[in-house]
Amino acid sequence: MTALDDQPWDLVIVGGGNAALCAAIEAAEAGLKPLILEAAPKPYRGGNSRHTRNFRCMHRGPLSVLTGAYEEDEYFDDLIRVTKGETDEGLARMTIRTSEECLPWMEAHGIAFQPSLSGTLSLSRTNAFFLGGGKALVNAYYNTAHDLGVTTAYEAEVTQIHVTGPRFEGVTAKIAGQETRIEGRGLILASGGFQADLDWLARAWGPAARNFLIRGTPYNRGVPLKQMLDHGADSVGDPTQCHAVAIDGRAAKFDGGIVTRLDCVPFSIVVNRNGDRFYDEGEDVWPKRYAIWGRLVAAQPEQVAYSIIDAKSRDLFMPSVYPPVEADTLDGLAQKLGLPGTKLRETVEAFNAACRDGDFHPTELDGLSTEGLTPPKTNWARPITEPPFYGYSLRPGVTFTYLGLKVDETARVAGPAGRFDNIWAAGEIMAGSILGQGYLAGFGMTIGTVFGRIAGQEAAAHV
Amino acid sequence: MFDRIEDEAPTLTATDEARRQVEICNACRYCEGYCAVFPSAFSQRAFSDGDITQLASLCHNCRGCYYACQYTEPHEFALNLPRALAEVRVESWDRFAWPGGFARLFQRSGGALALMLVLGIAALFWALTALAPASGEGFYAYLSHAAMVAIFAPPFLLPLAAIAIGLRRYWAEVGGQRIRWPHLKAAFADAATMRNLSGGAAEGCNFEKGDRYSQARRHAHQAVFWGFLLCFAATSSGTVLHYVFDMPAPYGLFSLPKLLGLPGGLLLTVGAIGLIALKFKADTHLGAPEVWGGEVAFVALLGLTGLTGLLLYFATGTALVAPLLALHLGTVLAFFLTTPYSKMVHGFYRMAALIRDAQRKQG
Ligand SMILES: Cc1cc2nc3c(=O)[nH]c(=O)nc-3n(C[C@H](O)[C@H](O)[C@H](O)COP(=O)(O)OP(=O)(O)OC[C@H]3O[C@@H](n4cnc5c(N)ncnc54)[C@H](O)[C@@H]3O)c2cc1C
Ligand code: HEM
Ligand code: SF4
Ligand code: SF4
């Protein structure tokens, strides 16, 4: 590898995920010599992008693996519904429109797509799935970037960003344990959110956040974001909020990824440590509810909850990566889960007594609701009676944080005295501009691809 | 070489490890598009030993799912599905082989295969001197047709019987059903194109260039596969000419045995050299490392059958025919005798797995 510190680089890119790679490829194709500084070691390169499976893409007719059409207005409506209006309409519409040309661009740069995965057929029109998932995508982009002459340093965590007035000068990075100053003529920040810094999360969210699990990479600790905020960069997004879903409570602290997903909740009752139910488990189909359950579980004692089903429901949802806790009696299950046995039995009995007869349809809202129970269960309410009984623990799993850098449609970062001369941001680190609240499946990769490419092109035009 | 057989007790740990990994895949499903293994796995929730055997035999060791996996080491899930399934294949071929024990030897030990080769060649040299006919044309001047048939019929037919026993065991373990024509059609189409080495849409496999895709292994295998079938067809056509049309060898260049055999021998030789070269470039830890040597020896043996056949053809009319004939026929003998126990059985079990998968898909 060339000595990293013996030249001013055309372009320094902080981060090694989707947004960074799209930026590096565009910049290199325009003739720059970019340097990627990736905090993670090579096997873990690619941040949260390595955990993804698809991106959401506008298209006016069938496009590659995408069926039918998904036009700008429908896409925008879907976005408004989840963000409840917390979006910059101009940036959002530009992102949506540009997504259409991203798909062929991705294919031309090594990404292979496949039809929707089994169990996600509802997304076959709106989301294009990466063959092999996000790590295959990341690998393909690294190969393309390296073929174009991009240099990559792994285990290179940027600790400081040096800015004079509106100009970026260089970064300090810890490379193989050594602090190294690296000069550059332009900077692209693509280092994701700060969710892996549990102290920061606890300051923002409250001490309970220490019990949260982080679904993705441990390397997104927000150091570059914090540096830029200290330099007076404009921020966007609620600094106290994170996107959290309910995942398997037994998952590792970091990098559990997609397999820690649990789909049992709609067919179960969910109790907290005290054995009490606390929310309507059957409010809607699971893809529309798993995000609010992160928050619900976060509000329970010790940030944990337990989803209880019986033998009838065992095969109704995608298999879990950890087998459920199993027992022939409710008391036995309570004991294994560490729940108060009498209380759990009472809760289940009260629930069973509130169930009524009716047709059960696992794949649609069947209106099979409890009567006279608070909180009610408004769909899929069937008595829990048939042994063996199964229990899954649930914990909040953080996907990303909302606080980010404010950018314009050229991905340029703004500071105290207007735009910085030579600093751009792409991906999760600026996503708050468009996704102020909620989440739309596949939109994170869309933002990263669109803004990564723009940042790379803009850097090439301005450094 | 032989003492290694003793210290490996038969266990099902390879199956258990593969099951652990496949269950993680079943919660993830990202690799669904790479090959037939995943759609087959994802049609189930629980995996019996037979299910794992079937998945392992479907896996073409393209390694796409290794490089795509976010759960490979150092992640705690330690996914390495290509290796886990390769280990299951090795173990299952040991288990199905009849008589037991030979597969343990010939799969793992390149030395044992080499020894067979030496024995085969020696046997042929002996036959050439001991059974030299009084008269005859072409090869038959050195070894009569009757002697050749006497030498080769048993080593050809007995291994076929042994393989049939292994296949029956396989079929019972994976719960195979009655085979119908559409199953065979689908399976042959998959094998003929090596569809499962195509990497889904990503143009080839990840065998020798890390996470980059390459068609090299697929093309080299095509060469070996078709080369072998052509050679086989050449020999068969010779047999038919001999018995049905009363046209004994030698045959001219424009005869069926030569038209099939020459390109066949070339493809077989070139393909085998290619496969060996690729094996030296590839990461051994994404396959079953303990059989690497046995595999290389098997590919070399296969390539030698082609090469010695070609040499024999080019030596026609020279003094080299006798030694080359011994070399070629000895190689063929060693190849046939070890077929049920060497890597060669993969063709049969893989074919069975493709048929079984066609049954699953077609219902
Ligand atoms: C489990 C999971 C599944 C997801 N699935 C999808 C999906 O299917 N579709 C979708 O659109 N979105 C999905 N998302 C969201 C998606 O991952 C993000 O929106 C997207 O990956 C963001 O890309 P990025 O390049 O901005 O950040 P990342 O891919 O997270 O990359 C950030 C990079 O910055 C590096 N870094 C951080 N700090 C430093 C530093 N100080 N110095 C140097 N480098 C640093 C990191 O190591 C990393 O390489 C998922 C998220 C998770 C957690
Ligand atoms: C019946 C269909 C067949 C299928 C589906 C098949 C499939 C495969 C696959 C997937 C591999 C690579 C994976 C591995 O190393 O285990 C392989 C290797 C190989 N095959 Fe086949 N094969 C078939 C028939 C044949 C035939 C007829 C021959 C020739 C005699 C042959 C010769 C080889 C050789 C030489 C190798 C390389 C072994 C190695 O590298 O270790 N195959 N085959
Ligand atoms: S190999 Fe890894 S990425 Fe592929 S399906 Fe299995 S767990 Fe998922
Ligand atoms: S190695 Fe290739 S053929 Fe085997 S399971 Fe993985 S993707 Fe399928």
Image: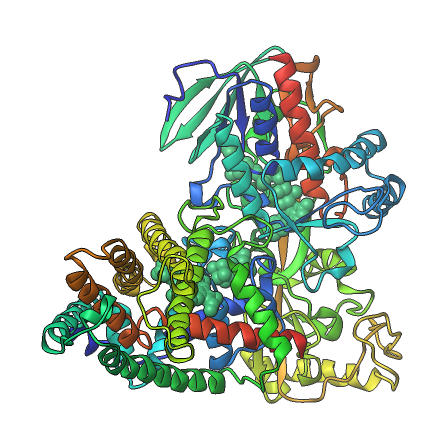
Color theme of the render: rainbow
Q: Percent from the top left, x then y, of residue B292?
A: 29, 61
At x 74%, y 34%, the residue is A101
- State the image coordinates of residue A185 (x, y, percent, origin top left): 54, 14
Q: Is residue B62 left or right of residue B177?
A: left
Which is nearer the eye, A434 or A242?
Answer: A434
Instruction: Tell me if A206 is positioned left or right of B95 in this view.
Output: right
**Dividing the image into 4 quarters, which one contains the N terminus of chain A?**
top left
Q: Nearer the viewer, residue B295 or B306?
A: B306
Q: List x then y, in percent, for residue B47.
A: 53, 77
The answer to whether residue B78 of the structure is visible from this angle is no
Vertical placement of A43 versus A359: above or below?
above
Picture quarter with the C terminus of chain A: top right
Task: Give above or below for B313 relative to A442.
Answer: below
Q: Residue at x 62, y 18 (%)?
A: A459
Visible residue check, residue B259? yes
Mark count: 0
Q: Quadrant of residue B114?
A: bottom left
Say which of B37 and B184 sits in front.
Answer: B184
Q: Quadrant of residue A233?
A: top right
Q: Residue at the location (43% across, 57% down)?
A: B221
Residue B320 location (% of width, % of height): 16, 57
Compared to residue A378, the image places residue A346 above or below, namely below
